[in-house]
Amino acid sequence: VSGKRDDLRGLKENVIVGRLIPAGTGFAYHQERQAKRAEAQEGPSAEQATDNLAALLNAGFSSDE
C-alpha cells in the first residue's frame, strides 16, 4: 500500500464525486469563432472598396493644390 494522493480535479473524478461542472462540447463557441473568421477574411465589399478609393483619390488631389 502506497501513500499516493489524488486531488480529484478531472471530469471523471468530479462526476464520481457528484459535482456538477460545466462540461459542454463548446459547439456554439466554435461556430461563432468560425463565423467571425469567415467574416474577417471576406474583406471589404465592392461598394466599400469603391468608396475607399474615391476618398483616397479625393484626398490626394486636394493635398496637391
Image: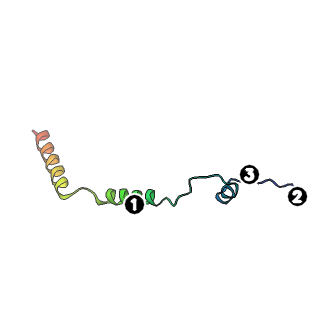
Q: Label 2 amino acid? A: Ser
Q: Is residue 44 shown above or below 55?
A: below
Which label belongs to residue 34?
1
From the image, which quarter does the N terminus lie in?
A: bottom right
Residue lying at 28% horizontally and 57% vertically, measured from the top left: 43
Determine the CA span between mark 2 and mark 3. 16 Å
From the image, which quarter does the C terminus lie in?
A: top left
Q: For the residue labelled by badge 3, is the local secondary structure a helix, a strand or a loop?
A: loop
Q: Is residue 49 shown left or right of residue 35?
A: left
Farthest residue, direction front: 18
Q: Is residue 21 shown left or right of residue 63?
A: right
Residue lying at 43% horizontally and 58% vertically, measured from the top left: 28
Going from N to C along the chain, the mark reached first, 2 or 1, is 2
Quadrant assignment, res 18: bottom right
Residue 36, how many percent across, how many down? 36, 56
Residue 34, how many percent across, how many down? 39, 60
From the viewer's side, name the closer residue of 33 and 58: 33
Residue 56, how many percent across, how many down? 17, 47
Q: Label 3 amino acid? A: Asp
Going from N to C along the chain, the mark reached first, 2 or 3, is 2
In this figure, which residue is indicated by the disc labeled 2? Answer: 2
Going from N to C along the chain, the mark reached first, 1 or 3, is 3
Farthest residue, direction left: 65
